[in-house]
Image (tube, helix red, strand yellow):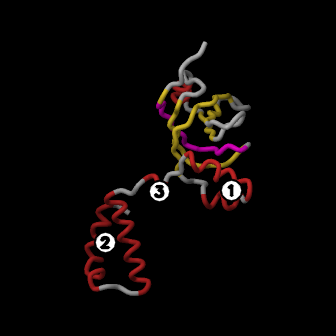
């Protein structure tokens, strides 16, 4: 819904709200007004975007019931700052799996990257660098959440040891 449409809808609905609505009309009106206000003034992304604290719950849900995982998580936005673990070429070549997280030998989050500009930015990353990862939840594989449409931002470089 575009802001201009919201403003028009709200101007028509205000008299109804002042008179008081009952039943489903009131629920629909309230929902429409709430949606318009969210469009006009923005809504908090934290309520819509999953974060690092959701990773374990997503994996647990996937392992228990993939249908529920699809309903509750697939297609939702994810954003978190996580330590970089590794970047590896995929089996078929031309693409790289980028892994993040703090779990022992396994990653908690992964993205597949094929864009040359993105791959060139990954070259200088080191294990432990703190990276802001943003993407869309796709799946779970080997206990790690997999994202599509990943974007990255280096937040802090890890100290180098030699």
Q: Quadrant of residue 99?
A: top right
Q: Which residues are magenta?
A: 143-155
**Callout 2 secondary element:** helix
Which residue is disc 2 drawn over? 9
Q: Is residue 146 magenta?
A: yes
Point 62% across, 48% down: residue: 55
Question: How busy is the neighbourhood of tag 2: few (under 14 within 10 Å), some, or many (20 plus)?
Answer: some
Q: Disc 2 vs disc 3: which is toward the camera?
A: 3
Which residue is disc 1 drawn over? 61
Point 42% across, 79% down: residue: 27
Q: Nearer the viewer, residue 149 or 43?
A: 43
Q: CA distance from mark 2 to mark 1?
A: 39 Å
Image: 49 above or below 40 = above
Residue 130, percent from left and from top = 52, 31
Question: How busy is the neighbourhood of tag 3: few (under 14 within 10 Å), some, or many (20 plus)?
Answer: few
Q: Is residue 145 magenta?
A: yes
* Residue 47, disc: 3
The reply, left or right, for residue 20 in relation to residue 120 is left
């Amino acid at each position: 819904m575009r802001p201009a449409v919201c403003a028009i809808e709200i101007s028509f609905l205000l008299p109804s709200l002042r008179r008081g609505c009952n039943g489903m009309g009131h629920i629909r009106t309230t929902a429409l007004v709430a949606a318009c206000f969210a469009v006009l003034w923005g809504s908090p992304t934290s309520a819509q975007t999953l974060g690092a604290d959701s990773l374990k719950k997503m994996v647990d849900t996937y392992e228990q019931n993939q249908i529920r995982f699809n309903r509750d998580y697939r297609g939702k936005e994810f954003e978190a700052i996580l330590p970089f673990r590794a970047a590896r070429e995929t089996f078929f070549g031309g693409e790289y799996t980028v892994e993040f997280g703090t779990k022992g030998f396994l990653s908690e989050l992964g993205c597949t990257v094929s864009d040359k500009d993105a791959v060139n930015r990954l070259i200088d990353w080191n294990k432990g660098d703190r990276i802001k990862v943003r993407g869309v939840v796709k799946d779970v594989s080997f206990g790690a959440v997999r994202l599509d449409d990943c974007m990255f931002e280096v937040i802090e470089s890890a100290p180098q040891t030699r």
